[in-house]
Image (cartoon, grey):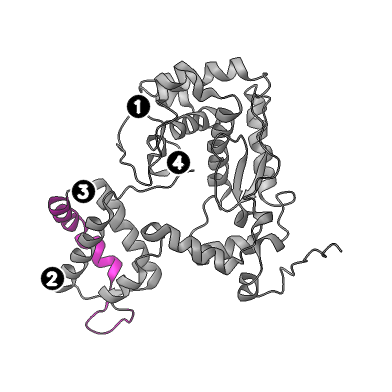
C-alpha cells in the first residue's frame, strides 16, 4: 500500500515542530519558489552568450556540483522562506539568501557543470592555464589577496582554492553581464584565462554535452531521512571552528553578557579600538598574515555584537582577548580555511 505524502502546514507549525520533520517529508520544490526566476535568469545569460547547454538542478544540503557530474545542487533551505529563516537562526547565515549572492553562486556552479559536461578539464590548454584537475582538494588553502593571476568573484578569493574552482570562477566572471571583464581584467594575467573561456564557449556553445547527469542524485534533499534538528546538529559539528557561532561560548567567558558599571563598554568597541595593535602583536608571535588576522578579529567583533557582550576598557581585558585570539590562531594552522563549492 502506497504511503500518503505528508502535507506541511507552513503557516501554523512552530519552529520546534518543523525541526522534528524529516527533510524528505517537507515536500520541497524549486518550481514556484524564489529560486525559479534566478535559474531562468541564468539560462537567459547562457542563451545570450550562445550556449545551448542548460545545467539541470536539484535541492541538496549545500551548494555543489558533484565531482564530474554536470548538475547543480542548491541548498534546500533557499526553497522556502521559513527554512531560510531557520537556517539563519541555526547557522547565523544562509549562503545565497539574496538574489545577488544566489545568482553569483549559480554562475559559479554552472562553470563546474559545463566543465564536466564537456570534459573541458582534459584539454591541454585548460591544464596549461588552470592547472591539473587531479590536484587534491584540501580543507584549507592559502591565497594571495592581491594576486592578478586569478579573477575575483566569490569571497575568500575562491579561484585560488583549486584549478577546478579557478575555471568555475573565471567562467562566472565571463558570464556575468555586469562584470565588464575586458575592462576590469584587461591588464591582469588572469585576462588570458578569460579570453580562453570566451573562445572556448564560442566553439562548444552549440555542441551536445558528452556527459549527462543522473536525473535524481541519491544525496538529494527529497531523499534525506534526517530531521531538520539532526541535520543542523551534524552540520555544526562538521563545520567545527568554521561554524560562524563556534566561538560564542568562549567569548561569553572572556567578556560579560551584562552591562555592569565596571564593564559598561561594548566588547566590539574595545576590539575595534585596539585592533591594529592586537593584529601587530599576533602577527609577530603567531606567524600568521595580518590580512587573515584582520578577518578573524572582524568575525569575533561580529559575534560580540550579536551576543551583546561587554568589557572594561583596561589592559587586563585586552590581555584576555589577545590570549584568546592567539590560541585560536595557533590552533587553526591556516586561517583561510574554506570548503569546496
User: In the figure, 61 relative to 90: above or below?
Assistant: above
Judge the density around disc 3: few (<14), some (14-19), many (≥20) Cα neighbours within 10 Å: some
**SS assignment at label 2:** helix
- Label annotation for residue 75: none
- Look at the numbered discs 2 and 1 and tell me whether their residues touch, using CB distance below 8 Å: no
**Residue picked out by circle 2:** 315
Secondary structure under tag 3 reads loop
**Residue holding disc 1:** 149
The x, y position of residue 267, in whole percent, is 28, 70
> Can I make out residue 161 in this image?
yes
Identify the residue position indicated by label 3 in the image: 288
Q: Quadrant of the N terminus?
A: bottom right
The tag earlier along the polypeptide, 3 or 2, is 3
Farthest residue, direction right: 1
Of badges 3 and 1, the one in the foreground is 3
Mark 4 = which residue?
154
Span colored in magenta: 257-286
Q: For the residue carrying disc 4, how many other residues have a C-alpha within 10 Å: few (<14), some (14-19), or many (20+)?
A: some
Q: Is residue 92 visible?
A: no
Q: Earlier in the sequence, mark 2 or mark 1?
A: 1
Q: CA separation, marks 3 and 2?
A: 23 Å
Mark 2 surroundings: few (<14), some (14-19) or many (≥20) residues within 10 A: few
Q: CA distance from mark 3 to mark 4?
A: 23 Å
Amino acid at each position: 500500500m502506497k504511503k500518503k505524502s505528508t502535507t506541511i502546514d507552513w503557516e501554523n507549525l512552530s519552529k520546534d515542530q518543523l525541526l522534528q520533520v524529516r527533510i524528505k517529508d517537507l515536500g520541497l520544490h524549486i518550481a514556484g519558489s524564489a529560486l525559479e526566476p534566478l535559474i531562468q535568469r541564468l539560462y537567459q545569460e547562457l542563451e545570450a552568450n550562445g550556449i545551448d547547454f542548460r545545467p539541470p538542478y536539484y535541492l541538496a544540503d549545500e551548494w555543489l556540483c558533484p565531482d564530474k557530474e554536470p548538475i547543480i545542487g542548491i541548498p534546500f533551505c533557499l526553497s522556502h522562506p521559513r527554512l531560510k529563516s531557520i537556517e539563519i537562526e541555526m547557522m547565523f547565515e544562509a549562503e545565497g539568501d539574496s538574489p545577488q549572492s544566489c545568482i553569483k553562486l549559480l554562475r559559479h556552479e554552472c562553470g563546474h557543470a559545463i566543465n564536466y559536461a564537456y570534459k573541458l578539464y582534459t584539454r591541454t590548454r585548460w591544464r596549461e592555464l588552470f592547472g591539473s584537475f587531479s590536484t587534491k582538494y584540501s580543507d584549507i588553502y592559502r591565497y594571495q589577496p592581491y594576486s592578478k593571476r586569478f579573477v575575483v568573484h566569490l569571497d575568500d578569493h575562491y579561484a585560488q582554492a583549486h584549478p577546478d574552482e579557478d575555471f568555475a570562477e573565471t567562467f562566472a566572471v565571463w558570464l556575468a553581464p555586469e562584470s565588464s571583464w575586458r575592462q576590469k581584467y584587461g591588464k591582469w594575467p588572469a585576462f588570458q584565462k578569460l579570453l580562453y573561456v570566451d573562445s572556448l564557449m564560442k566553439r562548444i556553445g552549440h555542441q551536445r554535452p558528452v556527459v549527462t547527469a543522473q536525473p535524481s542524485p541519491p544525496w538529494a534533499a527529497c531523499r534525506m531521512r534526517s530531521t531538520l534538528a539532526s541535520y543542523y546538529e551534524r552540520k555544526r559539528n562538521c563545520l567545527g571552528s568554521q561554524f560562524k557561532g563556534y566561538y560564542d561560548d568562549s567569548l561569553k567567558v572572556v567578556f560579560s553578557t551584562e552591562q555592569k558599571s565596571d564593564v559598561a563598554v561594548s566588547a566590539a568597541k574595545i576590539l575595534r579600538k585596539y585592533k591594529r595593535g592586537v593584529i601587530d602583536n599576533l602577527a609577530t608571535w603567531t606567524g600568521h598574515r595580518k590580512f587573515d588576522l584582520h578577518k578573524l578579529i572582524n568575525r569575533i567583533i561580529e559575534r560580540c555584537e550579536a551576543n551583546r557582550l561587554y568589557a572594561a576598557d583596561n589592559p587586563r581585558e585586552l590581555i584576555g582577548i589577545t590570549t584568546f585570539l592567539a590560541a585560536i590562531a595557533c590552533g587553526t594552522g591556516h586561517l583561510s580555511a574554506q570548503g569546496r563549492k
